[in-house]
Image (cartoon, coloured by chain):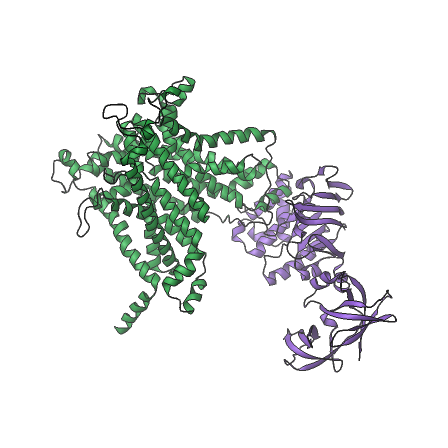
Chain colours: A purple, B green
Amino acid sequence: MPTIKLVNITKKFGKGSLAVDKLNMEIKNGEFVSLLGPSGCGKTTTLRMIAGLETPTEGEIYFDDECVFSDEKGINLSPDKRNVGFLFQNYALWPHMTVYKNISFGLENMKWPKDKIDARVKEICKTMRIEEYMNRYPAELSGGQQQRVAIARTLAPNPKVLLMDEPLSNLDAKLRNDMRAELKRLHKTTDSTFVYVTHDQSEAMTLSTKVALIKLGILQQYCPPLELYGDPANIFCADFMGNPSMNFVNVKGVKDGDSLLLNNDHFNVRFTPNDPIELKDGDYVLGIRPEFVKITEEGIESRVISSLPSGMETTLSLGVGDVTLSAVAFGSVDFAMDSVEHFNFEGNKYVLFDKESEKNLSLGSLEIVE
Amino acid sequence: MKKRWNRIKTFFSKPYNILLIAFLIVLSFLVVIPLISIVRDTFIVHSAEKSRVHQAVGTFTTYHWKRLFGAQFSKSLLWDPLKHSIVTSAWACVVSILIGGSFAWLVSRSDMRWKKLLTKLFIFPYIMPSWTLGLAWKNFFKNIEITGSNGIFHSFTGITVPTWFAYGEFPIIIVTGMHYAPFAYILIGGILHNMDANLEEAAIILKTSRLRMFLRITIPIVMPAVLSTIILVFSGAMASFATPQFLGLPVRYYVLTTELYASINGTNPGVGYILAMIMILISVIIMFVNQRLIGNRKSYATVTGKSANISIFHLGIWRTPVSIVAFIVVMCMSVIPLVTFALESLLSYTGVYDFNNLTLSFWIGQAQGHDTWQSESGILRNAEVYRTLWNSLRLAFTCALGAGTLGFLAGYSIVRRRGSFLSQVVENLTFIPYLIPSMAFSAIYLSMFATKHGIIPSLYGSFAILALIGTIKYLPMASRSGVNSMLQLSPEIEEAGIIMGVPWLKRMTRIIIPIEKTTIVSGYLLPFISAMRELSLFVILVTANNRVLTTLLLFYDEKGYTQFSNAVNLLIIIVVLLINFTVEKLTGASIEKGVGG
């Protein structure tokens, strides 16, 4: 069961365009890693390079201690020798073969004995709940069934590494939820390493043990999903994770002892970092998750611009002068449009970003200053 | 009563309904009545047959049927030509798929050299007239026993080519196969190109060997394209006239089309009409088989994956040899024929390939009077050539204008009323001319318009009959492309105009036509090119009055004026290629898009 290591992986397409830029990451044995990012960020390219379907321009890839690719040493192990499974976004089921044949085809290539193939195909079909479709052609199956056939085909040879390229993106919302649960269960039962490409932050959040957030071919942050959500490395990461997304307020900061007095034209707050850091006057961006904008009896006065109740919670858009903040009120509540509400801050999960570098400076607590 | 009147009024307030009704009436007359009239023609005495039937012209007779199916002549009139047609067409399919399919694979899946140049040249035979390769074959391999002079091959090698190689079945198969190879290339290449690369990658990941992947994944997936190629090539080869005429006639090797031509132009048109009916029957059967195959075909929809770069097969040490072989084959198909035409048109005495024997007389020389080696003036100072060239251009232009416009309007109205009975009937009517082999179609028109019918005067030998038949015959291509392009255009685009009160004509000229520009131009280009190089559709309708370039070529060839026929041939090819590339450059429309329509 290998650990996958990427060292300085770079991929250029054609002459100019850089798809992946000096990527370093280690995918440990048994992890469920999501490669996350907006479309065109190089996540699929990274996955295909791990599989060997794409050749990196520079860098090295290791499976445990075995080098499978190195531009310097001239090593490039072909995909069939890397012992990986690959699940394609559009499933890539062979249209002229039955479900049974689709699954057994790979096992035949590995010269399994006939009875073993038969047993394995039936077993995996049972696991994936597609037994009754074994003699159908892919065109006669629904999207969700095709998806399960594709997973069965990939899992049949027991790959220790399973690479998945947006496998759920062609399914409808309900099916996608079911399949998410199924994938998470599969990860536990197969005990293999999963690498999963997605552009859907909630998918990455809910499924993975670790998320690699990529922007324009550059790795932004690589950590467990809740850490990515709670302590984002920069404004891009903070903005990409969470729905409704984080509020960003442009503020001016003035040093006041161990804390910063932040002000914009409409309100003043005191930011106290959780761990002491070096503070100085300047421009900052304050990051506030909607769930940390608390509707209270008193505090900063705001106008309700919109109220979107979903039953479990209500998403609010609040206006303070020309600043708009999203807030979440829990429970079945609704607010009249243009009514006046107050809000306050609590806890210590507010993020201070440097205005210029957009980097996360510190987490801390907020306090309203009159 | 009032209600019904209102309903009729609403019906006709929609322009597409008016169009559909108009199409219904016109096409019934030009497509359905001919089909009926041909049956009648098999039972009456024609003027050419007076001396053999011994009955008054126009009276009922079963002579033709008895003659064609009677024991004495049926073998030579019917069964042999039928057998020849089927054998040559079937083998032509094999040849075209072998050449076109392997070329398609080399281009889309291997690292063959000079791909760009080779693909451009490979399409040439498709743009060039169908007899081009046949004539070139003759120039190259003709032998002294049959034609009285030897070909280029003999003069270079001193070997006299055996007759079976130079004429008849074998060269017809090879030449027809090569002519249709671009079809196979475009269809199979299209699938290979669009085939989801993930399908092959999935196989590689599952440790499939290259060979096994090719046999078990790639080949089965291109199979539907192979089937449609077979259908297209087979029906095309069945209907082709020029190649068997040029290569079969010298050794009295007849196929259905040449037999039909001989009958209708000879002393027994009645038999020709029966042959025409048989040919229609065959193409209906082919269409039926085709539909059955499409119906049963599993959906091989090729979703294009994200992986842009398909796995390229590295030919390794074979790269250069394979590229050279491909280059030679492509040269033989597209460039060498042109060279032979030029060469043959420059020879004072045919069969003598000597530098001193070259002359420009057949291009620019003066006529020397009868019974001399040059009885007519060179084609560039020959008024007759200019007249036929002008006639050809005029005809091609008229056919393109007619078929293109009608096809676009038919496409528009068919799509707008899709699902209704009326639209279905019209769609089928526009497609019928495709089923009728050219030769049979013109045989019908000949019988229909040879004499005066009510207000329609006799059109035999007129420009109008050529324009009419060309327009109708090419209507299926144009209306196919019209339907396809309109299907891709959502009706909302036009409805947005309706809501704002834009009148129909303005909606067409300002909204629909600008959007569909490229496809519409293709819809005109295809009939134009087809009409420029058409022989079998016009050949029996042409007299000295309305002669076109292609029939002039045949005329020279039949007379044995090799230099003239080669020169005229070159002229046609140059005109066709020139127009094709000009239009392609100017509009981005391309003739390749029309394949299969």
Does residue B371 appear in the picture of this structure?
A: yes
Q: Is residue B58 above or below residue B163?
A: below
Q: Position of residue B18 (x, y in %)?
A: 31, 61
Q: Position of residue B310 (x, y in %)?
A: 59, 43
Q: At 43% across and 49% down in the image, what residue appears?
A: B295
Q: Is residue B392 left or right of residue A353?
A: left
- The residue most toward the top is B158
Quadrant of the image occupied by residue B459:
top left
Q: Position of residue B71 (x, y in %)?
A: 22, 31
Task: Name the quadrant of the C terminus of chain A.
Answer: bottom right
Q: Is residue A111 left or right of residue B563?
A: right
Quadrant of the image occupied by residue B4:
bottom left
Q: At 38% across and 57% down in the image, what residue appears?
A: B412
Q: Position of residue B527 (x, y in %)?
A: 36, 46
Q: Is residue B481 above or below residue B271?
A: below
Q: How many marks?
A: 0
Does residue B595 appear in the picture of this structure?
A: no
Say which of B215 and B151 sits in front.
B151
Say which of A329 and B372 sits in front.
B372
